[in-house]
Amino acid sequence: MTLGVKLGHTLAFTADGEDADAALKGMVEAVRAGLGEEVVPAPLESEAPALAANERLVVVRNPHGLHARPGAMLVQAAKKFEADIQVRNLDGDGHSVSAKSLMKVISLGVKAGHQLVFKAEGSDAEAALAGLVEAVNSGLGEELVPLAAAPVAEAEQPEIHQVHDIAPNTEVQGVAASPGTAIGPVFVEAPIQFDYPEKAADAAAEQGKLSAAIKQAHSDLADSVVKATQPQAREIMAMHQELLDDPSLAEGAAERMSKGLSAAAAWWSEIDSAATLQAASPDALLAERAADIRDIGRRVMAILCNTSLPQKPDTPYIWVAEDIGPSDVVNMDPAKVLGMVTAGGGASSHSAILARSLGIPALVAMGGAVMTLKQGTEVILNGEAGTLWVAPEAEQLAQAKVRQQQEKALAEKAWASRDQHATTRDGHRMEICANLGETAKAVEAVEAGAEGVGLLRTEFVFMAQSSAPGLEAQIAEYKKAIDALDGRPLVARTLDVGGDKPLPYWPVPKEENPFLGVRGIRLCMQKPELLETQLRALLTAAGDQPIRIMFPMVADWSEWRWAKDMFDKVQAEVQAKDVQVGIMVEVPSAALNAQVFAEEADFFSIGTNDLTQYTLAVDRGNGELASLSDGLNPAVLRLIKMTVDAAHAKGKWVGVCGELGSDPKALPLLVGLGVDELSVSLKRVPMVKAQVRDWSLSACQQLAEQALLASDANAVRALVGEAK
Ligand code: PEP
Ligand code: MG
């Protein structure tokens, strides 16, 4: 019991007695057979690499190999020693790199089960070797997998479709992300599996295959560029062509082929290392290019392995995927996508926000089972109830079709009255504005009946560039929205980056908890000139038009004072005519101290996405916790009430610009709590206006009072359901 035997350890059995021989043989066989577990092919003695006296071998058991985080831990461990330490991956191409360079370590493409050899030279070489072996064996900050269960190479992974199954005519509960009913066949975008030999004898022949495949992929992309209907899709494909032209990928693969790898194995390991390296980049935009590298990698692999990439159907479908990101949406044809379903994500995750901005019914956090659906299975997606009805029977289908017709009629009615005010039955007027991520959409917002822009996420101006945009460029950008709004107010949020979304030209140290780290206004305080230029640009662009400026992630009075001083200084110079300056309430401390902030701030805009995340301690993008992440939790509602009461006591106004404003069940509560303005995704503007007209302020106030006393978000939802 106390031997503490680990993988790779040597056991010696001794036996006495008349069947000692048989016992020893039996024991050796039993251990070799795995003692009831699958065994990893450990190097046989004859295959074990010959190691020099200053070398040590260790097997990596981190589930995803040495990706950025464990890689960084390894490098830190190596840097503690004076010795020159080299490391090579016996299961990669075998070349040695410095163990003190993260880029180099990551470039080894170390996966679970790979064998690393450390070599050290110098005064503390012996201690360095022992320390590094110990560091790898203790997991480099990660939990280790037993090697028998280590993920197998990508090409050998089991078919994901065999993992689960959903019985026909079953309703699966997820999280509602974008309202509406969609009925149609699913297209499940499962990760593709490639089948290829690892080794090949004729390097020249393999080289020929790879060159031909790259050429073919290039010409396929050129065709797609010509056919693409959306300009953004065209740009992405042109960028992929450029990536394919990058000689370093082909050269890296050629080197691997010269060492005996097949074309496919060489190409994929080159792509994998390049993408891993890219993903480790501390700047978010560069890190996102990893997905592009893998994308072109897959194109070439599909040709090499004669595998067809999943083709989206030509007829309308409900798109099912693990997750859906901005670049997926760029490539999609909104006319064909009836609905979106993701296995992961949360109600305020990117895929949910994207779906709402496109006006497509969507569900998130459905769990892995949805990935097992058979292609073409008919489903009913209920974007209000958060359910997916799989292979429905005629009765459910008929009901869903009726609901869809009703929704269509309501949407048409709402669109027809989009230019009327949003006034409750008893005469209380709400202001309904649009959330924008790009200034160019302001025209559409006005067309949809928005009374202004309630949240302009100005990050887009900064994130699309390789360096900070200058004053003139920013003025031109903001003017686009101000001109389109034609006298309606523009609420612009100053730069909200950092932590989980750093800027390429503004490296920030990696943080353990980026959501609790240097984000929003905290980051701007480190680069005052950036905020100053932005404020100058916003105020100048506004001229005599109404502009409201607000600061994100304000948690403390000192942050507000700092930002407000900067604003006052710039405004004293620019003297824009119609200006208000406010605070985004997204951290509970801002709501709790709203009375103090209301002394100085002209308005508050409640960012319920972050306010919910920080109040309930639930990561907004974590699919597993999505059902907890509900802004209708009475705790969040209480913070909203505190904010409204504090603001109104000082004659200031309060908006809600988080996703909660688009939730029909939240609407009467926000009205009842006294919120003055709702800023919602552009496509929801006509419907939110119509929904306000359906309620009376007195009913909303009663409901809000009850909701504040409810036990949880479900009870609040039930209350609203009963009231309607
Ligand atoms: C919010 O947190 O609610 C918000 C509107 O800001 P973002 O979603 O951009 O963080
Ligand atoms: Mg926020």
Image (tube, rainbow, N blue to C red):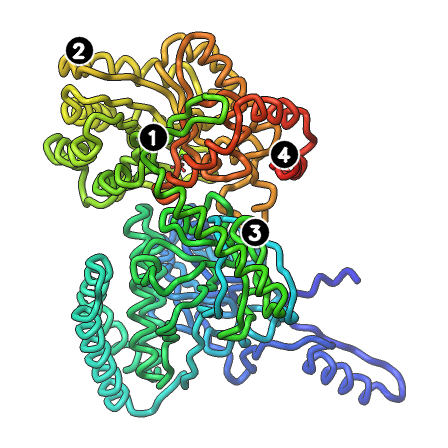
Q: Which residue is mark 3?
A: 386
Mark 4: amino acid: Ala
Mark 4 or 3: the one toward you: 4
355 on left or right of 401: left
Is 312 located above or below residue 21 in the figure? above
Is 106 located above or below residue 17 in the figure? above
Quick one: label 1 or label 4, which is nearer the N terminus?
Answer: 1
Mark 1 or 4: the one toward you: 4
Mark 1: amino acid: Gly
Callout 1: SS: strand
Quick one: label 3 or label 2, which is nearer the N terminus?
Answer: 3
Query: Do the residues under discs 3 and 2 have CB atoms within 8 angstroms?
Result: no
Residue at x 19% of width, y 45% of height: 466
Is 353 located above or below residue 130 in the figure? above
Q: CA distance from mark 4 to mark 3?
A: 20 Å
Residue at x 56% of width, y 46% of height: 626
Callout 3: SS: loop
Q: Which residue is mark 1?
A: 454
Is 174 located above or below residue 420 in the figure? below
Q: CA distance from mark 2 to mark 4?
A: 50 Å
Q: Is residue 62 visible?
A: no
Q: CA distance from mark 3 to mark 1?
A: 27 Å
Give the percent coordinates (x, y) of residue 475: 14, 31
Q: CA distance from mark 1 to mark 4?
A: 28 Å
Query: Do the residues under discs 1 and 2 have CB atoms within 8 angstroms?
Result: no
Q: Which residue is mark 4?
A: 723
Q: Which residue is mark 2?
A: 572
Callout 2: SS: helix
Mark 3: amino acid: Gly
**Mark 3 residue CB less than 8 A from any atom of ligand 1:** no
Q: Is residue 172 visible?
A: yes
